[in-house]
Image (cartoon, helix red, strand yellow):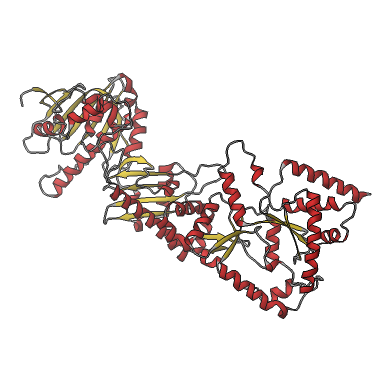
Amino acid sequence: MAARSGSLSINSENIFPIIKKWLYSDHDIFYRELISNGCDAVTKLKKLDMMGEYSLPDGFKARIDVVVDPEKKTLTFMDNGLGMTADEVEEYINQIAFSGATDFIEKYKDKSNSDQIIGHFGLGFYSAFMVADEVHIDTLSYKEGATPVHWECDGGTEFTMEDGDKAEVGTKITLFLNEDCLEFCNEYKAREVVKKYCSFMPTEIYLSKADAKEDESPELMNETTPLWAKHPNDCTKEEYQEFYRKVFQDYKEPLFWIHLNMDYPFNLKGILYFPKINMEYESIEGTIKLYNNQVFIADNIKEVIPEFLLLLKGVIDCPDLPLNVSRSALQNDGFVKKIAEYITKKVADKLAGMCKTEKEEYEKYWDDISPFIKFGCLKDDKFCEKMNDYILFKNLESKYLTLPECLEIKPMDDETVEENAVDENGEKVEAEIITEDAEEAGEEEKKEKVIYYVTDEMQQSQYINMFKAAKMDAVILTHNIDQPFISQLEAKNEGIKFQRIDADVTDAMKAKTSKKAEKEMEEQAEAIGKLMKKALKNEKLEIKLEKLKNKKISSVITLSEESRRMQDMMKMYAMPGMDMNMFGGEGETLILNANHPLVQYVTEHQDGENVGLICEQLYDLAKLQHAPLTPEAMTNFVNRSNEIMMLLAK
């Protein structure tokens, strides 16, 4: 071939500045593009051999070599793939073939917004000009009788092409780096970038130095058959754990994993790990690496990975992904949405299957994985629908229950009734007297499908004790995500109501009283109510007098579920600097236990010298078990407690 010169067929001199500025957001990505082009060339040559159109030489070993030369400021990429003829160089290199080139250049040449990206053009090779002042290509085609080609370009639109001297089939690309990008011919930087993008490419990649000594062998940089490419039945637990440690640099063992393996209607493979997270000290954000034919694309691409699964760690390889030229954005939203839906379905199926067949293991994981699952239910209706019956709730006895199990409210049995029932004088009543009433109460609760819950076991310990004494149960919901989560469950499950344990005093907690005693209590309640409001200087406070089974409890505060949720919502949207205490108090009810000696004392000595002191103390004791006291209220409580102890000491 006679040496010749020419211009790249792009109808503009501005293409390379645009490539440098617009095509790729990260300059180091040229490594990925040039190495993946080499992998493609090797793969094509192997296919030709399989089809009988070419015979690989004896001892052929597919490979790509990356050679750094800091002294000459060069970086070389070599592959032993199918190479190119002069005509192919003309077609694939000299003619940058994309539609609307002139319009594109006119549109972007004066822009400064780096978020605008071009697409649909096969320009991977030209990423080299982001870092190089000059690029050389030496290539020899696999075709019989082919002549080697040497090509040069200095970053403008001018090139030279002539016969070369390459003796072996394949392609060598040499980059003469510009002064701003010399870091890329540093051995350590090269290793970092190749590991980042090419750790799992299907052809072996070797890194070496141009001045390497004879005893220094090129370093293998990748694993050609990653774990996700294998069938799940061929992978061991140890391999999954080792892969997790290697890829994510996390030496805590993952809880479990889901191996995705799908060939139809699209090709998708991957592994999703559920990590063990220390919620107090670590971020809950995970990392899911997206690959295309074993070529790393990016972390956490939200179009492919459902938002709630971004909390996990894992890899997903989908060769069918519709990527643009820079592989930095996705096209064809409908197709991508189907991929995301498939991933969601597989995760839900795995979790549901574990709950059905490996319940004990599932329970062990639950506290760690519940934020993932609840977040998923909030973000994805289909996932929520699939997981509805496999969400676990831990009850007061630390036993895990599914939602259907939580709804199985049983009436109290005779033994329980006999143990807890007392009349207005505090005496036990015969079991048969109230068994029927208890069963009716139980049936009523079952009909309403009320699930009681606890948000703070220490703060609400008094209510927990009352529940246990009444042989009632509640579930523990202490995570921030639980409040919006139970609201969603209520919306999606008709007839289910969640109610915090301190929202009311149920009939099961009250002692059985006669009609005569109830009438007397009504009169006492009115009198003690006025006394309490006067002592507390709070006319809006609702006060009730009840006979509770537990005689050790003097007073409790209840706040209706609706009022508390409204207050929580108002606090959530409160303006900066707003006094948060302004939301407290509304809807509160102070319940005094008529079976407690202190309450009885107040009832019988309404004009007593220290009755006001006792009233205030009864209120604060109830408040302490319901919510933290304000600084001022706590100070008053401590001072009053000291005053009461001084009275006892006299």
Residue situated furthest right in the rendering = 650
Q: Residue at x 83, y 58 (%)?
A: 598
Q: Nearer the viewer, residue 69 or 419?
A: 419
Q: Can you see residue 616?
A: no
Residue 637: x and y in percent read: 79, 46
Horizontal side, residue 22 vs residue 42: left or right = right
Q: Quadrant of the N terminus?
A: top left
585, above or below 121, in the image = below
Horizontal side, residue 603 vs residue 322: left or right = right
Q: Nearer the viewer, residue 463 or 125?
A: 463
Q: How many marks?
A: 0
Q: Residue at x 71, y 46 (%)?
A: 629
Q: Can you see residue 112?
A: yes
Residue 410: x and y in percent read: 60, 72
Q: Nearer the viewer, residue 457 or 81?
A: 457
Q: Residue at x 61, y 36 (%)?
A: 577
Residue 37: x and y in percent read: 22, 37
Residue 295: x and y in percent read: 30, 41
